[in-house]
Amino acid sequence: MPEFAELRERMVQRQIEARGITDPAILDAFREVPREAFVSADYASAAYEDHPLPIEARQTISQPYIVALMIAAAGIKPGDKVLEVGAGSGYAAAVMSRIVREVIGIERQHDLVEVARERLKRLGYDNVRIVEGDGTRGCPSEAPFDAILAAASGSHIPKPLLGELAPGGRLVMPIGDPGWAQELVKVTKLPDGRITQESLGGVRFVPLIGEEGWSER
Ligand code: SAM
């Protein structure tokens, strides 16, 4: 069995770089974060496979390539403050924290919040904070954000998130019914406040549950 460092390098090259994401800052961030530390011991040996994996509370840690695609689409850069809605295991937040100034991850499942906070502290990611709550309502105490990424699929783009984007800010999130086809969309708030939207293709995510999302089934 190859070492984790070797598996991680292979993941970066074959799953991310080979699919067209070549920004060195993004590739280096994925090289730095030990994905095996963000899943339970049962799944550590599968941590660098090309698909999502189960985490606590019947949720998932997303496929590495999809995390990279969303990060690239959001165009995050060193001085940015980023909000991740659906922080889950904390992995994507940790990866982004290697690129930007500060990451706030919001997560509705208490058990995941506890585990992610403990893990990020243990690993020394001190520019990431995990907040417990419904991310469809945004995170007013921490706004504005230069970029917002949502790792769960909504019924629509929550208005509070649009309101919390800084001028020039980007929001990337999947939209669509959890059981059906979902579309990854990118919204940009132009410096004059106007909003533009583009489609980045089909994806599959767990549901975004909350006041401006789906209701719990
Ligand atoms: N980015 C995560 C990672 O790196 O592990 C994966 C997140 S998982 C695909 C989606 C997460 O969104 C789940 O943990 C779920 O509990 C959370 N979620 C769903 N609706 C939410 C909401 N309204 N506010 C905050 N978190 C939410």
Image (tube, grey):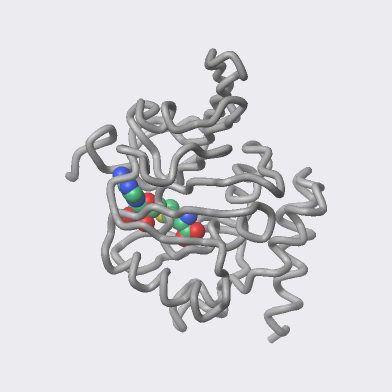
Q: Nearer the viewer, residue 29 or 201?
A: 29
Quadrant of the drawing holding the C terminus: top left
Quadrant of the drawing holding the N terminus: bottom right
Residue sitting at x 22%, y 36%:
211
Would you place residue 64 above or below residue 84 in this image? below
Q: Position of residue 112 (x, y in %)?
A: 34, 66
Count of marks, rendered view:
0
Would you place residue 174 above or below residue 195 in this image? below
Q: Residue furthest front?
A: 141
Q: Nearer the viewer, residue 184 or 147?
A: 147
Q: Position of residue 136 (x, y in %)?
A: 32, 38
Q: Is residue 10 left or right of residue 86?
A: right
Q: Nearer the viewer, residue 136 or 51?
A: 136
| Res 27 → quadrant | bottom right
Q: Is residue 21 left or right of residue 96?
A: right
Residue sitting at x 44%, y 27%:
162
Residue sitting at x 41%, y 70%:
117
Q: Nearer the viewer, residue 208 or 142?
A: 142
| Res 141 → quadrant | top left
Q: Position of residue 34 (x, y in %)?
A: 62, 74
Q: Position of residue 142 (x, y in %)?
A: 43, 46
Residue sitting at x 67%, y 60%:
98
